[in-house]
């Protein structure tokens, strides 16, 4: 009997599982790292246990601590979420040995299928078409070099135990293979505790279509339609939808039956099978995972099923409640992943405090799965996903328009996100026409990526007017009627004007604002520390009015689709206190130094990797912009560094 469930994960994953568990009457237990003690998933749980540490290797990847937490809390079962240890056979085995229930496949099944390499071998035996590649045991660079030459460049390196783009590298040339392999292995070890890799042909312009398979302990196994996950960046999914646009009933059945056959070959588990689908309708097996995916809500939306509840019931020994013929397919659903990242800077992860976080309103066909709240910290140690927005409609266009409305209503400030980028993707004519493949984003880059530049006069004038209007009134305690406490810009014999220095995105401007407005026009939100209103003072390119939200000393103003943070400053008090190193190369984000490849006095060529920084479980190389000599080195392997910190100083050749 399962009455208490421990969720061995964090973020929106843990929140989603606990929400379903609570509706089923279960007590929920959250584990958290030292820096996640105030995270939303920890706050939402009935019981929470501190694992200590910060990095996953110090907390969420420690099997002994997770088992001890389950026993201490009285949990009878552990749900792994997705990611971390969800496909780790040692974890499943340890849970079984401890007499607990694992809400996932048995260790034997993960041993056979938890590895992408093993999955490919099984598919090959079952006659499912494979992408040409190498998925053997040998992991030395020469083996991969030989395999890549046989396959033909470009090739794709992938972590055998991974997902979500971690430990994945595209290699265009043989000369880049060794470095890419080492980097991918480090990412895989950091994210999954397993550095093993495979290599396969990098297929151009494919669609990424996956089949959700569900099975029980009584021999029943079925597929729950398919999802299209072709819109990707950095090999990570950004937009998912179900069903896959344009997929015929015959092709859906063929792919579904192949996925079920694969599941039955190894045992009855919850899994999904991923395929590459070309323009001719031919599909190739890509990988198989023994867990629910991030994108499972779109499957729930078109079937009306709760897949987490199914997991719990299957773990209890209950049979699946429906047969294959009874699987619903109603309407269409689209999901987008909201990430803390900077699309203007190659989608690098962003960190900081969520000073502003507003989710879209609830309603029919609307769902938000998130793991954060306003005021939360986004750290450099974990995946940067903040949440998911899911829209359902009777058809694809209704779902798309509903999702656009949800994106328009969502507000995030304090941390860079991909929110405006998602709006441009979903609103793009090619997406509306379902012209989908994995090259969608680079092909439409000119439309999807903004070109940051100088903010124009119209922006600064609007920002100034809104900033003045939302300034709280000052009252002097010694003289409540004092005219000097008023901020009305009074000037005798001249129009009333207020001058203020504003800054935004590293730019600043002295703005002079007239004061002929009425404060009664401003709509106040319940929270006394902020003001929100729709501006009527100036139009933008969008047909709707721009959002503007005052939060303390910051005004968040929507401009050209982006929510810009505007603050006032005193130019006299803003004297530069720090001394920047001339020619210094700085950290592009918060993170930890995993490799230092140069030393002071060393000559380097343009493009050479100098330092490797790890953030959000992914590696980022700091490279020399041009040839030169390393004049000074200000970091060491293992150091934690903040964004903007100087890592090394170069003298140009």
Image (tube, grey):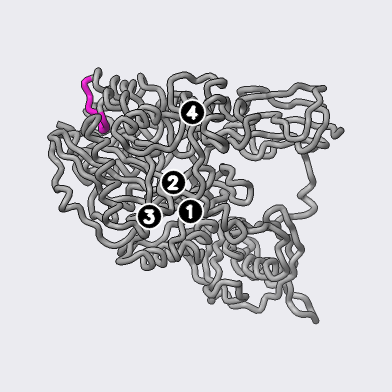
Q: Which residue is mark 1?
A: 357
Q: CA distance from mark 2 to mark 1?
A: 8 Å
Q: CA distance from mark 2 to mark 3?
A: 23 Å
**CB within 8 Å, label 2 to label 1:** yes
In the image, the segment drawn in magenta is 99-105
Which quadrant would residue 587 be assigned to in this image?
top right
**Labels 2 and 1: the sequence-earlier one:** 1
Residue 312 appears anywhere in the view: yes
**Labels 2 and 3: the sequence-earlier one:** 3
Q: CA distance from mark 1 to mark 3?
A: 25 Å
Q: Is residue 177 left or right of residue 163?
A: right
Residue 42 appears anywhere in the view: no
Q: Residue furthest bottom?
A: 493
Q: CA distance from mark 4 to mark 3?
A: 27 Å
- The front one of 454 and 398 is 398
User: For the stretch drawn in magenta, what is the main secondary structure?
Assistant: loop
Any mark on residue 241, and which?
A: 3
For label 4, count other residues whose C-alpha is less than 10 Å away and answer few (under 14), some (14-19) or many (20+).
many
For label 3, count other residues whose C-alpha is less than 10 Å away and answer few (under 14), some (14-19) or many (20+).
many
In the rendered image, the quadrant that contains the N terminus is top left
- The front one of 256 and 233 is 256
Q: Which residue is mark 4?
A: 188
Q: Is disc 1 placed on a helix, strand or loop?
A: strand
Q: Is residue 362 left or right of residue 174?
A: left
Estimate the x, y position of residue 267 in percent, counting from the top left.
22, 30
- The front one of 565 and 296 is 296
Any mark on residue 425, and which?
A: none
**Labels 2 and 4: the sequence-earlier one:** 4
Q: Which residue is mark 2?
A: 372
For label 2, count other residues whose C-alpha is less than 10 Å away and answer few (under 14), some (14-19) or many (20+).
many
């Amino acid at each position: 009997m399962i009455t208490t469930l421990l969720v061995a994960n964090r973020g929106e994953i843990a929140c989603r599982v606990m929400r379903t568990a609570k509706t089923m009457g279960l007590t929920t237990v959250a584990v958290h790292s030292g820096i996640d003690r105030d995270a939303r998933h920890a706050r939402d749980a009935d019981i929470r246990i501190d694992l200590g540490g910060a990095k996953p290797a110090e907390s969420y990847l420690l099997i002994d601590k997770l088992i001890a937490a389950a026993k201490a809390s009285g949990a009878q079962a552990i749900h792994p979420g997705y990611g971390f240890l969800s496909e780790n056979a040692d974890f499943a085995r340890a849970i079984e040995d401890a007499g607990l229930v694992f809400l996932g496949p048995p260790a034997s099944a993960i041993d056979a299928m938890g590895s992408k390499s093993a999955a490919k071998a099984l598919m090959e035996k079952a006659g499912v078409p494979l992408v040409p590649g190498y998925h053997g045991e040998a992991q030395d660079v020469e083996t991969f070099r030989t395999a890549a030459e046989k396959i033909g460049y470009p090739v794709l390196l992938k972590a055998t135990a991974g997902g979500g783009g971690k430990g994945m590298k595209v290699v265009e040339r043989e000369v880049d293979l060794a470095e890419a392999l080492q980097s991918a292995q480090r990412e895989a070890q950091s994210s999954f505790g397993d550095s093993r890799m495979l290599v396969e042909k990098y297929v151009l312009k494919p669609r990424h279509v996956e089949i959700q398979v569900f099975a029980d302990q009584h021999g029943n196994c079925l597929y729950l339609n398919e999802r299209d996950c072709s819109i990707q960046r950095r090999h990570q999914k950004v937009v998912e939808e179900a069903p896959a646009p344009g997929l015929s009933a015959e092709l859906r059945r063929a792919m579904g039956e192949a996925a079920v056959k694969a599941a039955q070959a190894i045992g009855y588990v919850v899994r999904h099978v991923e395929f590459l689908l070309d323009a001719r309708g031919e599909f190739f097996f890509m990988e198989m995972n023994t867990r629910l995916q991030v994108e499972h809500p779109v499957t729930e939306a078109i079937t009306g099923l709760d897949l987490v509840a199914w997991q719990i019931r299957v773990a209890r020994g209950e049979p699946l409640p429906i047969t294959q013929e009874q699987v619903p397919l109603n309407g269409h659903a689209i999901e987008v992943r909201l990430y803390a990242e900077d699309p203007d800077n190659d989608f690098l992860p962003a960190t900081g405090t969520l000073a502003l976080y507003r989710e879209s309103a609830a309603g029919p066909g609307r769902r938000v799965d998130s793991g954060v709240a306003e005021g939360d910290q986004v750290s450099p140690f974990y995946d940067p996903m903040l949440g998911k927005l899911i829209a359902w409609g009777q058809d694809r266009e209704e779902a798309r328009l509903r999702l656009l409305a949800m994106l328009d209503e969502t507000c995030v400030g304090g941390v860079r996100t991909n929110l405006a980028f998602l709006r441009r993707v979903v609103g793009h004519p090619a997406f509306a026409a379902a012209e989908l493949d994995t090259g969608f984003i680079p092909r439409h880059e000119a439309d999807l990526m903004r070109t940051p530049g100088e903010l124009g006069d119209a922006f600064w004038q609007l920002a100034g007017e809104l900033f003045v209007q939302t300034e709280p009134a000052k009252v002097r305690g010694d003289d409540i009627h004092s005219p000097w406490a008023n901020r009305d810009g009074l000037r005798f014999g001249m129009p009333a004007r207020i001058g203020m220095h504003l800054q935004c995105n590293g730019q600043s401007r002295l703005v002079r604002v007239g004061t002929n407005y009425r404060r009664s026009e401003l709509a106040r939100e319940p929270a006394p520390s902020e003001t929100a209103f729709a501006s009527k003072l100036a139009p933008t390119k969008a047909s709707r009015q721009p959002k503007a939200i005052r939060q303390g000393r910051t005004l968040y103003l929507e401009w050209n689709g982006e929510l810009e943070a505007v603050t006032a400053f005193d130019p006299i008090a803003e004297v530069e206190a720090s001394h920047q190193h001339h020619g210094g190369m700085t950290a592009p984000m918060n993170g930890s130094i995993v490799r230092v490849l140069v030393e002071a006095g060393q000559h380097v060529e343009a493009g050479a990797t100098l330092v490797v920084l790890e953030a959000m479980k992914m590696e980022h190389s700091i490279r020399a912009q041009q040839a030169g000599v390393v004049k000074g080195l200000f970091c060491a392997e293992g150091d934690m560094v903040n964004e903007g910190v100087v890592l090394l100083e170069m003298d140009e050749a």
